[in-house]
Structures are given as structure tokens and as C-alpha cells.
């Protein structure tokens, strides 16, 4: 006991702190989200997400090159189509915006690992993640479309697909469709425990995917539920998910930790748009030290058990790490 035991001994200077540090971040931990839109030479900043852009395929390629040259291994690609319709046909159009962006990126930056977000909400006129019948988001008819979308991303050259819709059975449906088209080696990273979160607000501006009626609570999880996350993850694992994701990250560190404890698959966590924006906004007002807050948040996500972090901070974090 004190005065013999003094934990401060191991905090005396930066060298010893570095030596006993339990958690460290590496560029390999990060996946950087990019937003592909239609057109040419388009690079439009997302107001609520300073430093993030909607970009046409030619500009996405330039951005992808920067990301790769910083040492970030992977991107997550979202698409904003020119036309939206009831059945989100832009999602599985071979000449769709994501498909075009994948081809362009693979052409110029072949070693950058391209993961695609598989969901209907960016492509449907109503902004929901599935097919609507009688005012309800229908599960089973949506599976077919998600499977088509995943296959079309794989055909364009995507390295991995990431379904984010939260329909039941979608991982199995996508696995089956990929396998039957010969994409047996394409992994699935499932948004396994995805909560109905207010922290997606800025993203919906970015992806122009705000639901036109109602909300996503009939398919995304209730933020109050912890045990249910393990059920969701185990279903996705049984259906063939290769990596499971928890989303959001900051307000769900307990879930990340539970999933890490209960499963042996790689665990990813999505540090979502609102989590990025609150730090950006507070920093702009001079209320918080942006770099330190960013590194603290990312470290906490890794400490909780995430192997991979999807984050809009990836480029800035890697710059700090490389210093
Ligand atoms: C699509 C999707 C969303 C996000 C990732 N994929 C939005 C949503 O579910 O409303 C959110 C990402 C973020 O907020 O950064 N379903």
C-alpha cells in the first residue's frame, strides 16, 4: 500500500508512458469513407462534415490516391445517384455511380482495398433502406435487391461488401448470391449491431438519404438494448459474416466490448458522422482541442475492442501518428 505503491512512477515521463501503453493506433486500423456522386469535376464539401466531400468518380480517384499514399489501407464507398426511384435501381445499375467509382479507383490505385456500403437508402426516392409496401419497409423483397447490389459491386471490382440496411437475413442472402456468381472470395463486413442513432444526422446530408416519412426504428436497433446486439451479431456470424461491425462507436463502447468478448471474428466500429461533427464544431468554437479529442476517441474505440475503425478522422489521425 501507499507509500510503497505509487502508480505515478510509471507516468513520470513520456518514455516510460510509451513503454507501458496498453493501446496504440496504427494506420492499418482505419477505413476511410468516401462519397461518390455523379458528374465530372465535382467536389462539394459537406457542410455539417468539414473536410468531407461529395465527389464525382474522377475526383474520388484523386482523393483515393491521397488516402492510399497516407498509408490508409482501405476505403468505404457510398454512392449518391443522379436519379432515385421507389426500388433504388441506381444501387444495382452496372453503370451506377459506385460501380463507376470502383472501376476508376481500381484502375488508378489498384492496391487500395475498396469496401462498398450495401444499402438502398441512398438510392430510393423515399430514403428508406428497403422496399416499401403499404407504408412499411418490407424485409424479404429487399433481400433480393441487396444481393443484386452486392453482386454488382463485386463485378465492378469491390474487394469487400458491407451491408448496412439491418434487414433480417441479408448476410445469408448476399453470401449466397456472391457465391453463386463466383465471388466466393469476397468477404462480407456486416453492420451487425447498428443502432437507430441521432448521430447519423450529418451523414444523411452527405448521402442525401433522409427518410421522407417516418424513421428507421423498425429496422435499426433500439439504443437501449445491449443483449440484443449479441443476438444480431451471432445471426450475422451464422449467415457468413467475415467481419462484424458495431455502429455508432463512441456511445456504444460497451457493445464493442461485449462483441469482442463473445466472438472471435474481427470487430469493426463505425465512428459515425455525428461523432465527427460534434468534435469539429466544438473545436471550431475553441471549446475543445481537436487533435487530442480525436486521438482520445479513436483510442477509446480500439481499447474497447475494435480491430478496425471506420472514421472520417482517418487521414488526420494518420498524420498525427506519422509525426
Ligand atoms: C446507410 C448508412 C448510414 C450510415 C452508414 N450507412 C445512414 C443511416 O443508416 O441512416 C451512417 C454513417 C454515418 O453517420 O457516418 N444505411
Image (cartoon, rainbow, N blue to C red):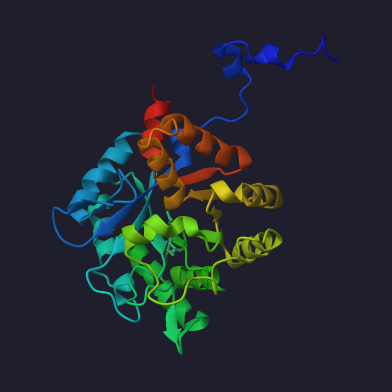
Which residue does the image show at 38% across and 42% down from the upper left?
281
Residue 266 visible? The answer is no
Left or right: residue 235 compared with residue 55: right
Outermost left residue = 41
Q: Where does the image place residue 90, in percent across and percent down from the top left?
A: 29, 72
Above or below residue 303? Residue 2 is: above
Residue 99 visible? The answer is yes
Which quarter of the figure has residue 205?
A: bottom left
Q: Where does the image place residue 270, in percent across and percent down from the top left?
A: 49, 50
Above or below residue 52? Residue 138 is: below
Outermost bottom residue = 134
Q: Nearer the viewer, residue 249 or 141?
A: 249
Q: Where does the image place residue 293, in percent across and percent down from the top left?
A: 48, 34
Which residue does the image show at 33% across and 65% down from the upper left?
155
Above or below residue 47? Residue 231 is: below
Q: Nearer the viewer, residue 215 or 181?
A: 215
Left or right: residue 55 compared with residue 78: left
Left or right: residue 62 compared with residue 269: left
Quarter in which the C terminus is drawn: top left
Q: Where does the image place residue 234, in percent across and percent down from the top left?
A: 66, 62
Left or right: residue 20 compared with residue 144: right
Which residue does the image show at 52% across and 53% down from the upper left?
248
Which residue does the image show at 46% across and 83% down from the upper left?
141
- Where's ligand 1: which quadrant? bottom left
Quarter in which the N terminus is drawn: top right
Q: Nearer the viewer, residue 237 or 233?
A: 233
Amino acid at each position: 500500500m501507499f507509500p510503497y505503491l505509487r502508480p505515478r512512477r510509471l507516468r513520470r515521463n513520456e518514455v516510460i508512458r510509451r513503454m507501458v501503453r496498453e493501446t496504440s493506433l496504427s494506420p492499418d486500423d482505419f477505413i476511410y469513407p468516401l462519397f461518390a456522386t455523379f458528374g465530372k469535376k465535382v467536389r462539394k464539401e459537406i457542410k455539417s462534415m468539414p473536410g468531407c466531400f461529395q465527389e464525382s468518380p474522377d475526383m474520388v480517384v484523386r482523393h483515393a490516391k491521397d488516402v492510399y499514399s497516407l498509408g490508409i489501407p482501405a476505403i468505404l464507398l457510398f454512392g449518391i445517384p443522379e436519379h432515385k426511384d421507389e426500388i433504388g435501381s441506381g444501387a444495382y445499375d452496372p453503370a451506377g455511380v459506385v460501380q463507376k467509382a470502383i472501376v476508376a479507383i481500381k484502375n488508378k490505385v489498384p492496391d487500395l482495398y475498396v469496401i462498398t456500403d450495401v444499402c438502398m437508402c441512398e438510392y430510393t426516392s423515399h430514403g428508406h433502406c428497403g422496399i416499401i409496401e403499404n407504408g412499411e419497409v418490407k424485409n424479404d423483397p429487399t433481400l433480393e435487391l441487396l444481393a443484386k447490389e452486392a453482386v454488382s459491386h463485386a463485378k465492378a471490382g469491390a474487394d469487400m461488401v458491407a451491408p448496412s440496411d439491418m434487414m433480417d437475413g441479408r448476410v445469408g442472402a448476399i453470401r449466397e448470391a456472391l457465391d453463386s456468381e463466383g465471388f466466393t472470395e469476397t468477404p462480407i463486413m456486416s453492420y451487425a449491431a447498428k443502432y437507430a442513432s441521432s448521430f447519423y444526422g450529418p451523414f444523411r446530408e452527405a448521402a442525401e438519404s433522409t427518410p421522407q416519412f417516418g424513421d428507421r426504428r423498425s429496422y435499426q436497433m433500439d439504443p437501449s438494448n445491449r443483449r440484443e446486439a449479441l443476438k444480431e451479431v451471432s445471426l450475422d456470424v451464422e449467415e457468413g459474416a467475415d467481419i462484424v461491425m458495431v455502429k455508432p462507436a463512441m456511445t456504444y463502447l460497451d457493445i464493442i466490448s461485449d462483441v469482442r468478448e463473445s466472438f472471435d471474428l474481427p470487430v469493426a466500429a463505425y465512428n459515425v458522422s455525428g461523432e465527427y461533427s460534434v468534435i469539429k464544431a466544438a473545436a471550431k468554437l475553441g471549446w475543445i482541442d481537436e487533435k487530442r479529442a480525436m486521438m482520445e476517441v479513436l483510442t477509446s474505440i480500439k481499447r474497447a475492442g475494435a480491430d478496425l475503425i471506420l472514421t472520417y478522422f482517418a487521414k488526420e489521425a494518420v498524420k498525427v501518428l506519422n509525426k
